[in-house]
Image (spheres, grey):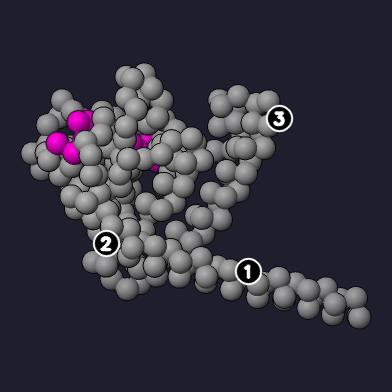
Amino acid sequence: MGVIRSLFRVGLGFFAIGVIVFCAVGAAMLWTSAHIQDTYGGPRGIPEPVDVAIVLGGGTKPDLILDFPSRQRVRMGAYHLAQGNARHLIMTGGVMRGLGVSAAQKMRDFALETGADGSSILLEERARTTFENLRFSFKMMDERGWTSFAIVSDDYHLARARELSRFLGREPSGLGAARSFHYEPIPMRIAITLRETAAWGYNLYKAAAWWGLGLMGYNDEDRARLVI
């Protein structure tokens, strides 16, 4: 019984530490999102013209209508395209399960509805995660000789996307902070905060695995198959 009690206390201690860390990460995420909105919202986000702005895919409803955060991301990308802050847009998001159409295509359709120039919009239709959004978009950039880029997403998501970009060896020249979080009902804000906080831990695992497999000699395709 003594051993069981000791193990229970140790487990309870680890659980308590996990809860504290989780709450701390969540609070930091909320503070960072507010800072990013103040710093990169609107025209401040891309101070110098870039070759391309990568608009990260969000969610789509079962009726194939983009959800509110996704529409906000597309609006922000279209704004920067119209202002000349970005010469092109990459809409990135894979085929959605059971819907038979990619998030990228629906994002492009919505951008056209806002008056965006369709000839300046490219589609990346394979990505299922933020890691893949960036990795596949960078590959498209390399194929076209583009070097400067910005990332467009919700303000609460941009910090994680920027760190993943840096992990992949690319430093964005700007960030397009779309505002959606503060317009959501409180239950949705709580869900977003929990999901984004958990995603930081999940991405830390993926980054560590990607780095470790690279040290073991795996190429990018093999690493992607094992990690993502």
Q: Residue at point 43% right, 43% down?
A: 130
Q: Is residue 214 left or right of residue 89?
A: right
Cα separation between marks 2 and 3: 42 Å
Q: Quadrant of the N terminus?
A: bottom right
Task: Find numbered disc 2 in the image and state the secondary structure of the residue it sits on.
Answer: helix
Task: Find numbered disc 3 in the image and state the secondary structure of the residue it sits on.
Answer: loop
Q: Residue at point 8% right, 39% down?
A: 115
Cα separation between marks 3 and 1: 30 Å
The magenta region covers: 84-97
Q: Residues within 10 Å of mark 1 (few under 14, many from 20)?
A: few
Q: Provide the residue designation for mark 3.
A: 216
Cα separation between marks 2 and 1: 30 Å
**Residue 175 in sight in this render:** yes
Marks 3 and 1, the one that precedes in the sequence: 1
Q: Provide the residue designation for mark 1.
A: 18
Residue 41: percent from left, percent from top: 23, 55
Amino acid type at image mark 1? Gly
Check if mark 3's residue and mark 1's residue have beta carbons within 8 Å: no
In the rendered image, the vertical position of residue 130 relative to residue 32, given as above or below = above
Q: Provide the residue designation for mark 2.
A: 38
Check if mark 2's residue and mark 1's residue have beta carbons within 8 Å: no
Q: Residue at point 45% right, 70% down?
A: 27
